[in-house]
Image (cartoon, rainbow, N blue to C red):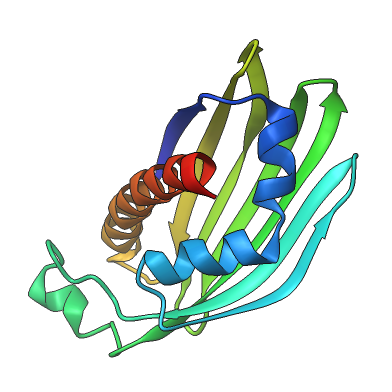
Amino acid sequence: MKFSLSQDYPVGLDVLWPVYGHPDYVRAKYLALGAHRVEVETAETTGEHIRVVLERVIAPDLDGVPDWARRLVGREYVMRHESLCRRTAPGASAVELLITPLGAPVEIRATGSFNETGPGHTRLALDFEVSCSLPLVGGKVSALFAGKVREALLEDHAFTLGYLNHG
Protein backbone atom coordinates (compact mmCIF):
# COMPACT_ATOMS: atom_id res chain seq x y z
CA MET A 1 0.00 0.00 0.00
CA LYS A 2 1.52 3.31 -1.05
CA PHE A 3 0.58 6.84 -0.06
CA SER A 4 2.14 10.28 0.14
CA LEU A 5 1.92 12.94 2.80
CA SER A 6 3.17 16.48 3.18
CA GLN A 7 3.15 18.71 6.25
CA ASP A 8 4.02 22.38 6.51
CA TYR A 9 5.72 24.13 9.41
CA PRO A 10 5.79 27.91 10.01
CA VAL A 11 9.53 27.92 10.81
CA GLY A 12 12.74 27.43 8.92
CA LEU A 13 14.62 24.15 8.75
CA ASP A 14 17.32 25.52 11.06
CA VAL A 15 14.65 25.87 13.80
CA LEU A 16 13.20 22.39 13.21
CA TRP A 17 16.55 20.61 12.88
CA PRO A 18 17.59 20.65 16.58
CA VAL A 19 14.02 19.86 17.70
CA TYR A 20 13.51 16.72 15.61
CA GLY A 21 16.58 14.99 16.98
CA HIS A 22 16.25 16.04 20.61
CA PRO A 23 15.41 13.16 22.96
CA ASP A 24 13.13 15.33 25.13
CA TYR A 25 10.98 16.24 22.11
CA VAL A 26 10.90 12.64 20.90
CA ARG A 27 9.83 11.28 24.31
CA ALA A 28 7.28 14.04 24.90
CA LYS A 29 5.75 13.56 21.46
CA TYR A 30 5.23 9.83 21.66
CA LEU A 31 4.00 9.93 25.26
CA ALA A 32 1.52 12.66 24.30
CA LEU A 33 0.39 10.53 21.36
CA GLY A 34 -0.47 7.58 23.61
CA ALA A 35 2.67 5.50 24.10
CA HIS A 36 2.93 3.80 27.49
CA ARG A 37 6.71 3.74 27.29
CA VAL A 38 9.31 5.31 25.00
CA GLU A 39 12.92 4.17 24.87
CA VAL A 40 15.16 6.39 22.78
CA GLU A 41 18.15 4.28 21.75
CA THR A 42 19.79 6.94 19.59
CA ALA A 43 19.11 10.65 19.22
CA GLU A 44 22.00 12.14 17.30
CA THR A 45 21.95 15.58 15.72
CA THR A 46 24.79 17.21 13.83
CA GLY A 47 24.83 19.94 11.22
CA GLU A 48 24.77 17.22 8.57
CA HIS A 49 22.26 14.68 9.87
CA ILE A 50 19.65 13.69 12.42
CA ARG A 51 19.43 10.03 13.40
CA VAL A 52 16.79 8.76 15.81
CA VAL A 53 16.15 5.16 16.80
CA LEU A 54 13.45 4.41 19.35
CA GLU A 55 10.95 1.86 20.52
CA ARG A 56 7.57 2.76 21.93
CA VAL A 57 4.95 0.56 23.56
CA ILE A 58 1.37 1.31 22.53
CA ALA A 59 -2.09 -0.13 22.86
CA PRO A 60 -3.54 -0.65 19.40
CA ASP A 61 -6.23 1.71 18.15
CA LEU A 62 -8.91 -0.69 16.95
CA ASP A 63 -11.38 1.90 15.65
CA GLY A 64 -12.34 0.86 12.15
CA VAL A 65 -10.48 -2.45 12.36
CA PRO A 66 -12.65 -5.38 11.21
CA ASP A 67 -13.22 -8.35 13.53
CA TRP A 68 -11.01 -10.68 11.48
CA ALA A 69 -8.05 -8.31 11.92
CA ARG A 70 -8.64 -7.74 15.64
CA ARG A 71 -7.61 -11.35 16.28
CA LEU A 72 -4.16 -10.53 14.88
CA VAL A 73 -3.58 -7.72 17.37
CA GLY A 74 -2.37 -8.10 20.94
CA ARG A 75 -3.26 -5.88 23.89
CA GLU A 76 -0.13 -3.83 23.28
CA TYR A 77 2.81 -3.92 20.95
CA VAL A 78 6.20 -2.37 20.37
CA MET A 79 6.77 -0.03 17.45
CA ARG A 80 10.40 0.44 16.40
CA HIS A 81 11.23 3.69 14.58
CA GLU A 82 14.45 4.35 12.71
CA SER A 83 14.76 7.74 11.03
CA LEU A 84 17.56 9.51 9.24
CA CYS A 85 17.58 13.06 7.84
CA ARG A 86 20.63 14.07 5.82
CA ARG A 87 21.36 17.63 4.75
CA THR A 88 21.63 17.80 0.98
CA ALA A 89 21.97 21.60 0.70
CA PRO A 90 21.29 24.65 2.88
CA GLY A 91 17.58 24.49 3.71
CA ALA A 92 17.16 21.00 2.24
CA SER A 93 17.42 17.43 3.48
CA ALA A 94 16.60 13.86 2.47
CA VAL A 95 14.55 11.71 4.85
CA GLU A 96 14.40 7.94 5.37
CA LEU A 97 12.02 6.33 7.85
CA LEU A 98 11.42 2.72 8.84
CA ILE A 99 8.66 1.79 11.29
CA THR A 100 8.31 -1.82 12.34
CA PRO A 101 5.66 -3.24 14.66
CA LEU A 102 7.87 -5.85 16.36
CA GLY A 103 6.51 -9.37 16.05
CA ALA A 104 4.11 -8.40 13.26
CA PRO A 105 4.56 -9.20 9.56
CA VAL A 106 4.29 -5.50 8.68
CA GLU A 107 6.88 -2.94 7.58
CA ILE A 108 6.37 0.77 6.98
CA ARG A 109 9.00 2.59 4.90
CA ALA A 110 9.10 6.21 3.82
CA THR A 111 11.48 8.38 1.87
CA GLY A 112 11.21 12.03 1.10
CA SER A 113 12.45 15.50 1.90
CA PHE A 114 12.43 18.11 4.63
CA ASN A 115 12.94 21.39 2.77
CA GLU A 116 12.44 25.09 3.24
CA THR A 117 9.77 26.33 0.85
CA GLY A 118 10.35 29.99 1.66
CA PRO A 119 11.67 32.18 4.45
CA GLY A 120 10.40 30.76 7.74
CA HIS A 121 8.49 27.87 6.11
CA THR A 122 9.44 24.20 5.87
CA ARG A 123 7.67 21.25 4.26
CA LEU A 124 8.07 17.60 5.16
CA ALA A 125 7.08 15.47 2.14
CA LEU A 126 7.12 11.69 2.44
CA ASP A 127 6.24 8.77 0.18
CA PHE A 128 5.20 5.71 2.17
CA GLU A 129 5.07 2.04 1.36
CA VAL A 130 3.31 -0.24 3.84
CA SER A 131 3.77 -3.96 3.30
CA CYS A 132 2.54 -7.11 5.01
CA SER A 133 3.84 -10.61 4.34
CA LEU A 134 0.65 -12.47 5.32
CA PRO A 135 -0.75 -14.53 2.45
CA LEU A 136 -4.24 -13.66 1.19
CA VAL A 137 -4.89 -10.79 3.62
CA GLY A 138 -1.57 -8.91 3.38
CA GLY A 139 -3.05 -6.17 1.18
CA LYS A 140 -5.93 -5.60 3.59
CA VAL A 141 -3.60 -5.52 6.59
CA SER A 142 -1.31 -3.07 4.76
CA ALA A 143 -4.29 -0.81 4.01
CA LEU A 144 -5.36 -0.87 7.68
CA PHE A 145 -1.85 0.03 8.85
CA ALA A 146 -1.57 2.76 6.20
CA GLY A 147 -4.76 4.35 7.52
CA LYS A 148 -3.49 4.23 11.10
CA VAL A 149 -0.14 5.71 10.04
CA ARG A 150 -1.90 8.60 8.29
CA GLU A 151 -3.96 9.32 11.43
CA ALA A 152 -0.86 9.15 13.63
CA LEU A 153 1.05 11.53 11.36
CA LEU A 154 -1.73 14.12 11.63
CA GLU A 155 -1.47 13.90 15.44
CA ASP A 156 2.33 14.05 15.20
CA HIS A 157 2.13 17.23 13.11
CA ALA A 158 -0.32 18.89 15.52
CA PHE A 159 1.92 18.01 18.48
CA THR A 160 5.00 19.41 16.74
CA LEU A 161 3.27 22.68 15.89
CA GLY A 162 2.23 23.07 19.54
CA TYR A 163 5.71 22.15 20.72
CA LEU A 164 7.28 24.76 18.48
CA ASN A 165 4.89 27.39 19.83
CA HIS A 166 5.22 26.50 23.50
CA GLY A 167 8.46 24.50 23.79
Classify residue 79 as left or right of residue 16. left
Q: Nearer the viewer, residue 37 or 167?
A: 167
Query: What x and y, as percent, mark residue 4?
Result: 44, 33
Residue at 30% of width from left, 50% of height from top? 151
Number of disc labels: 0
User: Farthest residue in the bottom direction?
Assistant: 75
User: For this view, does 74 lie left or right of residue 23?
Assistant: left
Q: Residue at x 70, y 58 (%)?
A: 22
Percent position of residue 42, x then y: 77, 70
Q: Position of residue 130 (x, y in %)?
A: 45, 53
Taking 37 as reference, is 67 left or right? left
Evaluate whether residue 133 shows in this view: no
Residue, far front: 166
Q: Residue at x 55, y 62 (%)?
A: 99
Location of residue 64 by image quarter: bottom left
Whether residue 89 is situated above or below residue 135 in the rendered picture: above
Q: Nearer the viewer, residue 118 or 80?
A: 118
Residue located 59% across and 26% down the image: 11
